[in-house]
Image: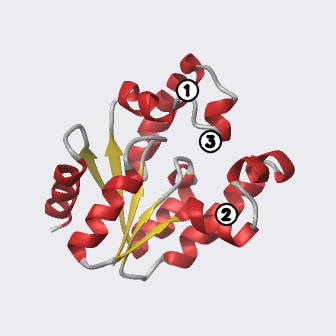
Amino acid sequence: MTIFLSGFMGCGKTTVGIILAEKLGYEYLDSDELIVEQEGMTIPEIFAEKGEPYFRKVEAEIIKSLCGREAVVACGGGAMLNDGTADFAKNSGKVVYLDVPFNICYERICGDTNRPIVMSSTKDELYERYKNRKPVYIKNSTVQVRCTSSPTECAKEIMESLC
């Protein structure tokens, strides 16, 4: 089964995903890393040279290509906002929304130069984006897990919710 972790930037998809994959004996994959590898460019370079719509198209293709693998996939913050991509992922595996309060996410992402959206947005703008995305994450997920404890506890909660 493929488990896709979704949620806002900084919610812990990478950290929790690595732990979860280890506990399940699954492969761990990061959709953003796969995009960078495929495109031969950093995410900021892709956004600057080819634009966000191009990035989202490549992101959707990568997500679809991972379906059917025994893997935990940390998806970029915008991956499951595309209903088509989310439906494909839900029909091929499980989409887990990591629900983390905005302030925690913001502490983790502020000043991160590898996140073009963060670098071009104020805290208030990011909060608006967070509020707008949250209902879409919920709608496009199979399971929602409130992740306010340790990453190990979050991974355990995810495993329990998937049984």
Which quarter of the figure has residue 137?
top left
Give the alpha-carbon distance from disc 3 to disc 1, as whole Å.
12 Å
Mark closest to the chain's N terminus, 1 or 2: 2
Q: Tally the marks.
A: 3
Is 41 situated left or right of 97 in this image? right
Q: Which mark is residue 36?
A: 2
Q: Quadrant of the N terminus?
A: bottom left
Whether residue 142 is visible, yes or no, is no
What residue sits right under mark 3 in the picture? Answer: 115
Q: Nearer the viewer, mark 1 or mark 2?
A: 2
- Kindly identify the residue that appears in the image at 31 percent across and 55 percent down: 16
Whether residue 25 is visible, yes or no, is yes
Q: Nearer the viewer, mark 3 or mark 1?
A: 3
- Kindly identify the residue that appears in the image at 59 percent across and 22 percent down: 125
Give the alpha-carbon distance from disc 2 to disc 3, as whole Å.
13 Å
Is 110 situated left or right of 68 in this image? right
Mark closest to the chain's N terminus, 3 or 1: 3
Is 118 situated left or right of 72 in this image? right
Q: Amino acid at mark 3?
A: Arg
Residue 63 in picture, x, y percent from top left = 55, 68
Mark closest to the chain's N terminus, 2 or 3: 2
Q: Amino acid at mark 1?
A: Leu
